[in-house]
Amino acid sequence: MEYFVKAKENLKIALLSFEQECYNTCANRAYFAVFQAAIAALLHTGVKRGKYDHKWVQSEFNERLIKRRKVYPGRIKPYLMEMQMLRNTADYEHRSISKNDASDQLRKAQEMIGLIEKEIEQ
């Protein structure tokens, strides 16, 4: 699962970024960690696509793996979109990400990646 390896790598960099008080980078890498983990989860269940754009991955993960199959808990349904919005702020807006926002982003990433890892390893 190459996408899951990438997800774990991005999570590691998000953690290091947080520790170094680089909150914008933390928000960016945490989002990409969950984005790549979601792709890995979709692939694990046989859902494939040539190019994985953000909107498609968010939609398919939520619809197929949370709503229909109930593989993952409903509480994580908003995570991908919320985390992308914070990542967009970090990357494209004038203001910076706060320590609290980065911490929340990191918590969501750790939770979601932990859930996906359990499912993939079964």
Image: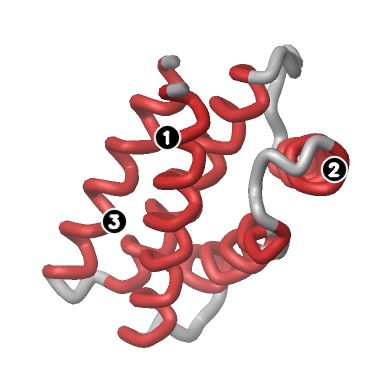
Closer to the N terminus: mark 2 or mark 1?
2
- Amino acid type indicated by mark 1: Glu
Image: 45 above or below 91: above
Residue 93 in which image quadrant: bottom right
Question: Circle 2: is it few (<14), some (14-19), or many (20+) Cα within 10 Å?
Answer: some
Q: Secondary structure at mark 3?
A: helix
- Quadrant where the N terminus is found in the figure: top left
Residue at the image point whose x is 71% and y is 13% from the top: 46
Of circles 3 and 2, the one toward us is 2
The answer to whether the residue labelled 2 contacts the one labelled 1, judged by CB atoms less than 8 Å apart, is: no
Q: Is residue 79 left or right of residue 106?
A: right
- Amino acid type indicated by mark 3: Ala
Question: Could you tell me how far apart the alpha carbons at marks 1 and 3 are, in whole angstroms?
Answer: 17 Å
Image: 38 above or below 12: above
Residue 117: give its label: 1
Question: Circle 1: is it few (<14), some (14-19), or many (20+) Cα within 10 Å?
Answer: some
Question: Could you tell me how far apart the alpha carbons at marks 2 and 1 are, in whole angstroms?
Answer: 19 Å
Residue at the image point whose x is 66% and y is 55% from the top: 73
Residue 63: give its label: 2
Q: Of residues 31 and 73, which is closer to you in this image? A: 73
Q: On the image, numbered disc 3 is attached to which residue?
A: 14
- Amino acid type indicated by mark 2: Glu
Closer to the N terminus: mark 3 or mark 2?
3
Question: Could you tell me how far apart the alpha carbons at marks 3 and 2 are, in whole angstroms?
Answer: 27 Å
Q: Secondary structure at mark 1?
A: helix
Residue 33 in which image quadrant: top left
Residue at the image point whose x is 51% and y is 82% from the top: 94
Closer to the N terminus: mark 1 or mark 3?
3
Task: Give the x, y percent position of residue 68.
Answer: 87, 40
